[in-house]
Amino acid sequence: MNSKKTLFVITFILFSFNLFSQVGGISASKLVVINTETVPANKIEFEPSFGFSVSKNDSINMNSDFGFRFTYGINSKTEIGIFVPLHLNSVNWGIKYHALDFNKLSLGMIAGIENALIVNNSEEVKLSSLFTTYAGGIVSTYQFNDKLSIDFSGQFQNHFEADKIDFNSFLNSEIGYFVSDGLQLVTGLQYENHHILNTQENYFTINSGITVEKAKNFILVVNIPYQFKNKYSASSIGFAMALTILID
């Protein structure tokens, strides 16, 4: 990937188990995985995104969602942002720091919290009712050449409640190749492990799609995720689309 081009794109997979959120509000370079590049200093990225998924067990189930991302470049190495879903039950705040560069390899750190917007007024307001989860992780990008690159991210997520055991971990990796000027083919694998009390749930998803940047400061992202069947849920296939707009 040409680092001079602002390929800051992110979509989300909208499956029925997507109650477990990774760090949100920050930029990416391909479909789902977060990369090390940050939004240019003093600039803003705005991104509406939409997605749905379909699964079949005893009946056909469909899930859909819509949301907006706003990300601001604090300086050449740091960005902050927010992801706001249309239902407004909660928002995700995130920060990314581009830490190190080793020739073609770069490393970064990410962190975020989920802020509950709807609080039960009958209960005493406390930290765990205002901020439901926190998350963090590391990201890396390896740039083979101007056309080929691979991104990797490892994240964890947990609730603020000390007595709630539901530690979740996420591993994402995607490889992208520019087949022509502005058109990138992307594929990758996503793994999720959710530890809820004495139960562990594992999910595997293949993400496949494209990014298109034919106009200045506009990038279109299309993702077709496929989640494999396991003992907790049926297999599902989805469609997600996002439009990334860099505001000078």
Image (cartoon, helix red, strand yellow):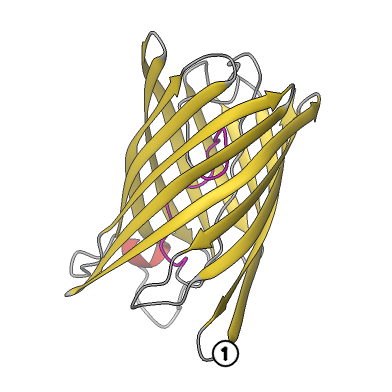
Main SS category, magenta section = loop
| Circle 1 SS class | loop
Residue at the image point whose x is 64% and y is 69% from the top: 64
The quadrant the N terminus occupies is top right
The quadrant the C terminus occupies is top right
**Range covered by the magenta-colored residues:** 18-32
**Does the rendering let one see residue 215?**
yes
Position above or below: 5 against 48: above
Image-quadrant location for residue 100 = top left
Image-quadrant location for residue 45 = top right
Relative horizontal placement of residue 144, taking residue 59 as reference (left or right): left
Position above or below: 123 against 42: below
> x and y percent of residue 71 in the render?
60, 36
**Does the rendering let one see residue 23?**
no
Relative horizontal placement of residue 223, taking residue 247 as reference (left or right): left
Residue furthest bottom as drawn: 58
Position above or below: 124 against 142: below
Residue furthest top as drawn: 103
- 219 or 94: which is nearer to us? 219
Magenta segment includes 31: yes
> x and y percent of residue 189 in the render?
43, 48
> x and y percent of residue 120 in the render?
45, 78
Where is mark 1, residue-wise? 59
Figure disc tally: 1
Classed neighbour count for the residue bearing mark 1: other residues with Cα under 10 Å, few (<14), some (14–19), many (≥20): few
Residue at the image point whose x is 51% and y is 29% from the top: 79
Mark 1 belongs to which amino acid?
Ser
Residue furthest right as drawn: 215
Magenta segment includes 8: no
> x and y percent of residue 72 in the render?
59, 31
